[in-house]
Amino acid sequence: MAGIDEAGRGPLAGPVVAAAVILDPKQPIAGLADSKILSKLKREHLAKLIKAQALSWSIAIASVEEIDEFNILQATLLAMQRAVYGLPIQPDEVLVDGKQIPKLLIPALAIIKGDSKIPAISAASIIAKVERDRLMLAYHQQHPNYSFHLHQGYGTKLHLAEIVEFGFLDIHRKSFNPLRTILSQQRD
């Protein structure tokens, strides 16, 4: 059984990242939980354990262009589908955090708050979040005027002020508000 979760649905910048994990029942990993309640240090420690001990794991993204073209839900489901099909070992069943299931040829079940109930989904939540944070840190290094290492691309006052001062980057989701509104005002 594989657990699937994503990170980065709400930010104004960067891709959405999905992960799929098949845990090894012979090597349980203590401390798995929803990535949002874990400290950064704990997430990074657990991500290393998951990658070392899981039977199989995969990380996939849907790009900013795909988010803007298809919408965030469809892009998230696409990233999830890519994560499942990227697993070196294909599962017999997939459990997905949330209400929606990606199109798969494998039986799947959506579980609301699955990231806090199902260890494999928790593991997917953790490695997806760690990977997205790593990507946002790389964006910060490429674009130091944007504090991606602090706000992770979310629509904070700081991030919005940076966009107004320095403009849009190609990693900004131009279909998201308030970015869409700012763009339309700039065109007028």
Image (cartoon, helix red, strand yellow):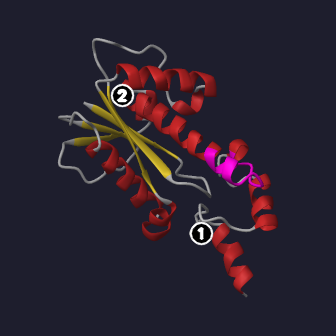
**Magenta stretch holds residue 164:** no
Q: Is residue 54 left or right of residue 132?
A: left
**Whether residue 54 can be seen here:** yes
**Magenta stretch holds residue 139:** yes
> Looking at this view, is 166 or 75 the one in front?
166
Query: What SS does tag 2 mark?
Result: helix
Report the residue marked by disc 1: 174
Disc 2 vs disc 1: which is toward the camera? 1
Q: Is residue 134 left or right of residue 145?
A: left
Q: Which mark is residue 3?
A: none
- Give the x, y percent position of residue 82: 32, 49
Report the residue marked by disc 2: 120
Q: Residue at the spot x=67%, y=80% of the render?
A: 184
> Looking at this view, is 182 or 142 the one in front?
142
Question: In which quarter of the view is residue 94 placed?
Answer: top left
- Give the x, y percent position of residue 54: 33, 23
Kind of residue at disc 2: Ala
Q: Residue at the spot x=41%, y=40% of the render?
A: 5
